[in-house]
């Protein structure tokens, strides 16, 4: 069922989004945020009662049949794609749920304050740091950091968003990143534990165990809570895929909810389209003379 909160619709102020999420928690319900790469996805995610809808550039790749990691690659302008999906597909059809814009905060070609003004003017109620360099590691991550395209740019983007009264829900992969984002004023922090398992394009070898996911998630929560205990905490990725997985990790951590992109949008389409097509193909022709 839709959230009983009777807000006015997009765009919401930062406090209005926070109040909506708190209303969900006050009902002892988990916060569910969902990625949407198409208008039809967003329309029916809203119908299902999601608390937030997040627009990622990866949603376009995901719904085109490619892995979500394509959103981290140089296959297009991440900021332009997210804005386009929002303007022409999602914002026109979502009636009441706050819509969040994915922003590539380390894009060196943009004056980030100017881009965030456009995000706000478009009618988004907040921002998310995707693509995020928090999930890049090793030598390549070091190169990004040393050449001015590191995670700190995403932190600075959140600081700007806070000044602009934009709600911020952000990915982090490590406790120290959670601390930085909490200090920057992030409203909600998502513990990203890796690419989602399952389906036709989910990972297998590259993920962690549920026990690892629980431990990493709680460390991230603890680090941010030391800075701001009023932060909303969510889980994402790795082995956390199905509703039962979410119930398990929420029972073992102090997280308030879950962010599903592949888990909601891609998995739902893969299963339902396959099953529906099978049913159609089971139709036989009547005997004819």
Image: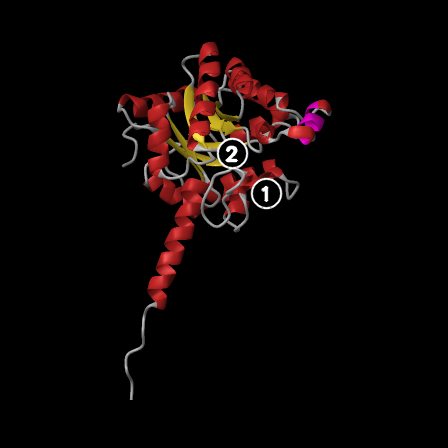
Q: Is mark 1 on a helix, strand or loop?
A: helix
> Main SS of the magenta segment?
helix
Farthest-out residue, right:
147
Nearest the camera: 163 or 134? 134
Q: Which of 48 and 174 is in front in this view?
A: 174
Q: Residue at label 2?
A: 194
Q: Where is residue 55 in the image (x, y as percent from the top left)?
A: 49, 37
Instruction: Kindly identify which numbered label has been placed on residue 56.
Output: none
Residue in the picture at 49% in, 30% down: 193
Residue depicted at x 45% and y 44%:
198
In screen coordinates, is 87 left or right of 107?
Answer: left
Q: Can residue 211 be seen in the rendering of this structure?
A: yes
Instruction: Give the magenta-colored segment's residue range.
Output: 140-145
The image quadrant where one finds the C terminus is bottom left
Is label 2 in a helix, a strand or a loop? loop
Residue 269 x/y as whole percent: 41, 50
Q: Is residue 92 visible?
A: no
Task: Provide residue 165's location: percent of width, then percent of height.
Answer: 49, 20
Judge whether 63 appears above or below 3 on screen: below
Front position among marks 2 and 1: 2
For residue 173, side relative to residue 255 (left or right): right
Coordinates of residue 184 in the picture (x, y in percent): 54, 15
According to the picture, the residue beneath numbered tag 1 turns out to be 70
> In the visual, does 175 lie left or right of 72?
left
Residue in the foreground of this view, choosing between 50 and 80: 50
> What's the residue at 42%, 51% (across, down)?
270
Whole-Å distance between the Cαs marked 2 and 1?
A: 14 Å
At 48% from the left edge and 50% from the top edge, which residue is drawn?
200
Q: Please say whether residue 132 is one of the residues in the magenta stretch.
A: no
Q: Which residue ends up furthest to the bottom in the rendered image?
A: 289
| Among the two numbered marks 2 and 1 on one chain, the one whose residue lies closer to the N terminus | 1
């Amino acid at each position: 069922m839709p959230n009983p909160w009777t807000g006015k619709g997009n765009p919401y102020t930062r406090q209005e989004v926070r109040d909506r999420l708190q209303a969900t928690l006050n009902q002892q319900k988990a916060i569910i945020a969902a990625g949407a790469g198409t208008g039809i996805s967003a329309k029916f995610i809203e119908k299902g009662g999601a608390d937030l809808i997040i627009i990622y550039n990866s949603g376009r790749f995901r719904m085109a049949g490619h892995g979500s990691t394509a959103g981290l690659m140089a296959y297009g302008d991440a900021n332009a794609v997210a804005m386009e999906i929002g303007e022409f597909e999602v914002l026109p059809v979502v009636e009441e749920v706050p819509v969040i814009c994915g922003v590539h905060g380390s894009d060196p070609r943009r004056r980030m304050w100017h881009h965030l003004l456009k995000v706000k003017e478009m009618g988004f109620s907040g921002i998310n740091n995707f693509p995020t360099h928090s999930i890049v590691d090793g030598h390549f991550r070091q190169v990004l950091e040393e050449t001015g395209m590191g995670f700190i740019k995403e932190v600075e983007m959140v600081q700007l968003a806070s000044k602009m009264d934009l709600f911020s829900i952000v990915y982090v992969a490590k406790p120290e990143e959670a601390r930085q984002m909490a200090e920057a004023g992030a409203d909600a922090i998502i513990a990203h534990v890796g690419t989602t398992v399952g389906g036709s394009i989910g990972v297998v070898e590259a993920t962690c165990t549920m026990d690892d996911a629980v431990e990493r998630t709680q460390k991230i929560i603890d680090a941010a809570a030391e800075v701001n205990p009023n932060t909303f905490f969510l889980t994402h990725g790795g082995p956390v895929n199905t509703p039962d997985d979410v119930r398990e990790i929420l029972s073992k951590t102090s997280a308030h909810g879950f962010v599903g992109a592949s888990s909601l949008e891609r998995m739902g389409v893969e299963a339902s389209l396959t099953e529906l097509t099978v049913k159609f193909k089971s139709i036989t022709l009547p005997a004819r003379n």
